[in-house]
């Protein structure tokens, strides 16, 4: 069935093990947050839809909980596959919530769940090129969610000073090396008007892609916090 949520007995214990690996590496990282919305922006304190590329999901949960220390609950979109069940366990180990669904399986139900999460006071974290790509191409779901909810999209650009890349993965998944530096650029808010046309939707997708490609620390940044 195309709408089922897939899960095996081993996905939860494996997810706990993956969390231990991620937490262990992330504890060693030097962390730098840059907020392009300015020094008075209460980052982590307002509802938003965070967009980041699929191959950069290794560290954001750890950074959000222990560095940003957001006051609002965070919900993460994961696929309805077995891999998604594992990632949902990782998110829950970080004290986050998880929505299961993607364009390939349980898409409409997953979208409705995301709307409910926002209505319940959560922020949403979405990988707009996931779960299967194409890499660095924004699918329209994140734009539609922003248009329907009225909450801004925040592009989260993540860069590591040193990392390994899984070349066989479709997205070239990136794993930071222990004791390297992670820089997260909190991009400028993207507000999407209600009732946009298909042409406007495509344009906002391009805006998200450009923001995630070019929201680098060297573009007039405002450094908010640096933590070892």
Image: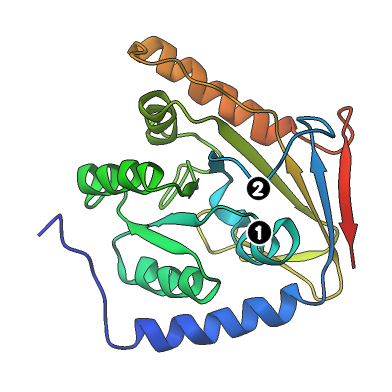
Quadrant housing the N terminus: bottom left
Mark 1: which secondary structure?
Answer: helix
Check disc 2 and report the residue beneath it: 44
Check disc 1 and report the residue beneath it: 64
Q: Does residue 90 lie above or below 172 as drawn?
A: below
Coordinates of residue 220 in the picture (x, y in percent): 89, 27
Coordinates of residue 23 in the picture (x, y in percent): 66, 78
Residue at coordinates 69% horizontally, 28% vertically from top-left? 188
Q: Does residue 153 lie above or below 24 as drawn?
A: above
Mark 2: which secondary structure?
Answer: loop
Query: For mark 1, does the 10 Å Cα neighbourhood hold few (<14), some (14 to 19), or many (20 or more) residues?
Result: some
Residue furthest to the left in view is: 1
- Sequence-wise, the earlier of marks 1 and 2 is 2
Mark 1 and 2 residues: CB-CB less than 8 Å, in contact? yes
- Residue 217 lies left or right of residue 27; in this view the side is right
The residues tagged by marks 1 and 2 sit, at their Cα atoms, a distance apart of 8 Å
Query: For mark 2, does the 10 Å Cα neighbourhood hold few (<14), some (14 to 19), or many (20 or more) residues?
Result: some
Coordinates of residue 13 in the picture (x, y in percent): 41, 89
Residue 55 picture quarter: bottom right
- Residue 117 lies left or right of residue 123; in this view the side is left
Nearer the observer, 1 or 91: 91
Residue at coordinates 47% horizontally, 47% vertically from top-left? 124
């Amino acid at each position: 069935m195309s709408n089922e949520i897939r899960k095996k007995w081993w996905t939860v214990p494996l997810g706990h093990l993956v969390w231990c690996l991620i937490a262990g590496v992330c504890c060693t990282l030097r962390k730098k947050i840059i907020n392009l919305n300015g020094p008075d922006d209460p980052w982590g304190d307002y509802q938003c839809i965070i967009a980041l590329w699929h191959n950069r999901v290794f560290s954001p949960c750890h950074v959000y909980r222990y560095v940003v220390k957001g006051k609002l609950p965070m919900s993460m979109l994961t696929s309805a596959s077995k891999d998604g069940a594992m990632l949902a366990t990782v998110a829950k180990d970080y004290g986050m919530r998880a929505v299961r669904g993607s364009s390939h399986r349980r898409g409409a139900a997953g979208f409705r769940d995301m709307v409910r999460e926002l209505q319940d006071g959560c922020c949403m974290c979405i990988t707009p090129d996931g779960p299967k790509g194409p890499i660095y191409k924004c699918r329209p779901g994140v734009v539609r969610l922003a248009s329907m909810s009225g909450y801004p999209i925040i592009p989260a650009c993540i860069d590591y000073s040193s990392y390994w890349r899984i070349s066989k993965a479709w997205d070239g998944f990136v794993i930071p090396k222990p004791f390297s530096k992670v820089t997260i650029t909190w991009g400028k808010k993207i507000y999407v008007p209600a009732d946009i046309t298909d042409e406007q939707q495509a344009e906002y997708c391009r805006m998200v892609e450009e923001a995630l490609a070019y929201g680098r620390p060297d573009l007039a940044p405002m450094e908010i916090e640096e933590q070892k």
